[in-house]
Amino acid sequence: MKLYHAPNSRSVRIVWLLEELGLDYDLEVMKLGDKAFKSPEYRAKHPMSRVPLLEDGDVSIFESGAIVEYLVTKHGGGKMRPAPESEHFPAYLQWLHYAEGMLMPPVNTIMVETFFLPPERRNEENVKRATKMLGHMLGAVEKHMEGREFIAGDFSGADIMCGHACIVSGRLGGGLDGTPNVKAYTERLQARSAWKKAQEAGA
């Protein structure tokens, strides 16, 4: 199994998951902005020239949410994914997809406007709107996490996805002081040894 990974990108989710599952894998570390992303060889693997990209035998799959579902279903051995008949299964699906559908769009806007665009092209109004939206999106997680340790029963792929999005959100838009449940949740996640290993991968 081989993972194409760039530090400080969504591929951190997959390193984290592979470590949580105790799976053997090879890591191909790429730096964001490397010319290697634009090579014909890599474009043939990933048409958008991004990470993560997972190769598992004859299988080649990209998009972090899809890779999470693939790994927990095929290689999880019943771990990190509630059974369909479980009371936690609907929440698992909901929050797994909430990460990219609701949390990451405003995160992306903030990052583009504050890090990637040159100062003369940045739009402070876009940042204000995205920060306000991110606050609303985190508010839903805050309410859900009241009295919960993890997002859908036991620790699962939904925590890999939504937890990572919450951690990234906490680094933007003023942090998580206004959402104490989310803040405590992200602190629990970042205390896990697999998360720490994922942060060190390729650093």
Image (tube, rainbow, N blue to C red):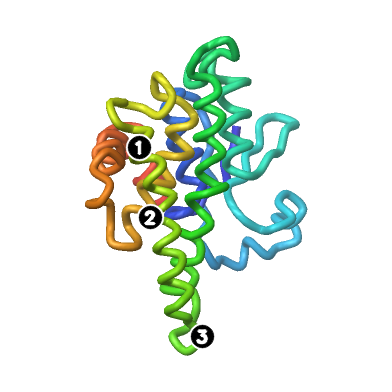
Q: Amino acid at mark 3?
A: Arg
Is 171 displayed left or right of 130 in the figure?
left
Percent x, y of residue 3: 57, 41
Q: Quadrant of residue 184?
A: top left
Q: Quadrant of residue 35?
A: bottom right
**Lower position in the chain sequence, tag 3 or tag 2:** 3
Q: Is residue 102 above or below residue 154?
A: below
The residue identified by callout 3 is 121
Is 125 displayed left or right of 142 in the figure?
right
Percent x, y of residue 74: 63, 20
Foreground of the two, 93 or 144: 144
For residue 135, the mark is 2
**Lower position in the chain sequence, tag 1 or tag 3:** 3
Q: Amino acid at mark 1?
A: Lys
Q: Quadrant of residue 193?
A: top left
SS type, badge 1: helix
SS type, badge 3: helix
Q: Nearer the viewer, mark 3 or mark 2?
A: 2
Question: How many angstroms separate mark 1 from mark 3 (CA)?
Answer: 36 Å
- The residue carrying pointer 1 sits among few (fewer than 14), some (14 to 19) or many (20 or more) residues within 10 Å by Cα, namely few
Percent x, y of residue 128: 41, 71
The residue identified by callout 1 is 143
How many dots with numbers? 3
Q: Quadrant of the N terminus?
A: top right
Residue at the spot 38% in from the left edge and 33% down from the top edge: 144
Question: How many angstroms separate mark 2 from mark 1 (CA)?
Answer: 12 Å
